[in-house]
Amino acid sequence: MASEATTAAKHAGSRTSHARAILGPALHERLAETKVLLVGAGGIGCELLKNIVLVGFGHITLLDLDTIDLSNLNRQFLFRKKDVKQSKALVAARTVSAFNPNVHIHPIHGNIKDTQFDLSWFKSFDIVLNALDNLDARRHVNKMCMAGEIPLVESGTAGYLGQVQPLLKDRTECFDSNTLYCVGKELPDGVFYHDILNLLSMEDMWRYRDKPTPLDFDAIKEDRFILRGEPASQAKIPINGAPNGAASTSSAKAVNGDMANGSGANGLKDQRELSLRDSWEMFVNSTDRLAARLRAGEETISFDKDDDDTLDFVTAAANLRSAAYGIQGKSRWEIKEMAGNIIPAIATTNAIISGLIVLQALHLLRKSYDRLRNVHLQFKPAVPLSTITLSPPNVSCGVCRDTYAEILVDPARVTLGDVIDGILGDEDEEGRREVSTFEEKRLLSDPDFDDNLGRTLESLSVTRGKFLSIVDEDGEYETIALAIGVLPLVSLSHLYCCALIFHVFGE
Ligand SMILES: Nc1ncnc2c1ncn2[C@@H]1O[C@H](COP(=O)(O)OP(=O)(O)OP(=O)(O)O)[C@@H](O)[C@H]1O
Ligand SMILES: [Zn+2]
């Protein structure tokens, strides 16, 4: 018995001695108390979970919505064939528990966007580590961490490339600061016209190469645009090996019409050579379709080779650029092959990135803010890593600029007007500030639109986990984003606001 106990103690000592030596006893002891949330138990998540368990993080919550797929086994080393179809979070937690029995791991099989994971829940963690694979979930976690001022390390890999980005409210810009949301009207003119004009103004650039042609979209539309001697409707953007006969737009259209569902028609549509005007038309149509989808509520649209709207958009944009610069175009089919090329996930990349995530997490926990870096893993054997110092919060980004507060309410009873009164004060004074309110981009009220003030938050679908933004009409005060939380089970049915909020618009 005695000797067993000694062996166990000796093992415990050797298990932690390296981490302790590297981190120093003070930080090492703090890690045992640190509560970390790891979102995602896929390629990066499995590596990272193993790392943080070995480093000695004491309380780990691991969340993933998915079950294990056979195709995960080549790189998600915490899973075995017998685990297929089981919860990733549960199996990963079980496997790593054996690496360090002193660590408490709490696995959750669920979606991080679920409303039960509201701001109060996020605030119970000291740090959050993202190991996700989609923009939507990343943006959600980013916003929660900005709202709760919780340090976040964001990461991603694609083939040999990877990136790690430490984020903290008021210290760094956020993950959303650089997200491109939609294609505005300015984009085509900017990229295909003004940018090219700008390049043309640099005379030296064009001494030994052909000058590009700025594309005037209005002139193309009216077919008065001449590209290398031909009107837009006749000017073909040459592609490699266009099949005979398919090159003519009109005949391709006729065939498409006759055999709308046949694979032959698709083949022609995908392989025909397009004129400048065809490409312009495809660009305008696909942009309209994508814009309509965004208006209908799709938050982000990612490229998917099987999504015709995105494939048309990329094909058209690529060919317009080819036309402007006089380079060979690509058929829709070629674009599908190139842009839809699935980049293999590489275990080594995930392992390197997971190590870097831990380093940035330690800087955040130590508050060594001057040592934080965005780290890129690149395909350059001589210089595999490059680091960039962090950008400060972005004043034009609503997510990292706004002031956040949490309110605990019963959304079924509290009205929008109650909340506004709670923040501005009840008095109907002359000097009361004028505000408008939003949920995401949805306008709920403004000084001339008060129809919703008497409605409950629930009826306006401003419920647990969502944010109600209050915008000062004069722009003198920062926007306040109120995170909606639920009241504890005591029968406090009316609005309960933190004192903090009353100060924000106070005198
Ligand atoms: N909203 C979400 N909530 C919780 N987990 C999520 C959410 N979105 C994505 N994930 C998880 O993030 C992980 C990302 O890991 P990874 O990129 O390796 O994906 P994968 O599905 O395991 O692999 P692949 O997509 O290559 O088959 C996945 O396990 C996925 O289930
Ligand atoms: Zn931001």
Image: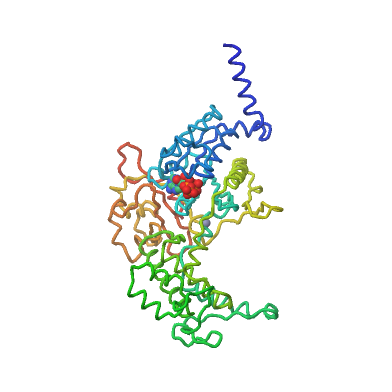
Q: Nearer the viewer, residue 113 or 424?
A: 113
Percent from the top left, x then y, of residue 455?
A: 28, 55
Q: Is residue 164 left or right of residue 38?
A: right
Residue 421 against residue 4 in the figure, above or below: below
Picture mark count: 0
Percent from the top left, x then y, of residue 32?
A: 57, 31
Q: Which residue appears at 46% of the width and 60% of the height?
A: 302
- Can you see residue 406? yes
Residue 446 against residue 145 in the figure, above or below: below
- Can you see residue 148? no
Of all residues shown, which one is farthest toward the right? 382
- The N terminus, quarter of image: top right
User: What colour scheme was applied to this rendering of the protein?
Assistant: rainbow
Percent from the top left, x then y, of residue 476?
A: 48, 62
Percent from the top left, x then y, of residue 488?
A: 35, 38
Q: Which residue appears at 39% of the width and 60% of the height?
A: 298
Q: Is residue 273 left or right of residue 56?
A: left
Q: Is residue 330 left or right of residue 452?
A: right
Q: Nearer the viewer, residue 396 or 181?
A: 181
Of all residues shown, which one is farthest toward the top? 1
Of all residues shown, which one is farthest toward the front? 244
Q: Nearer the viewer, residue 129 or 225?
A: 225
Residue 370 against residue 439 in the figure, above or below: above
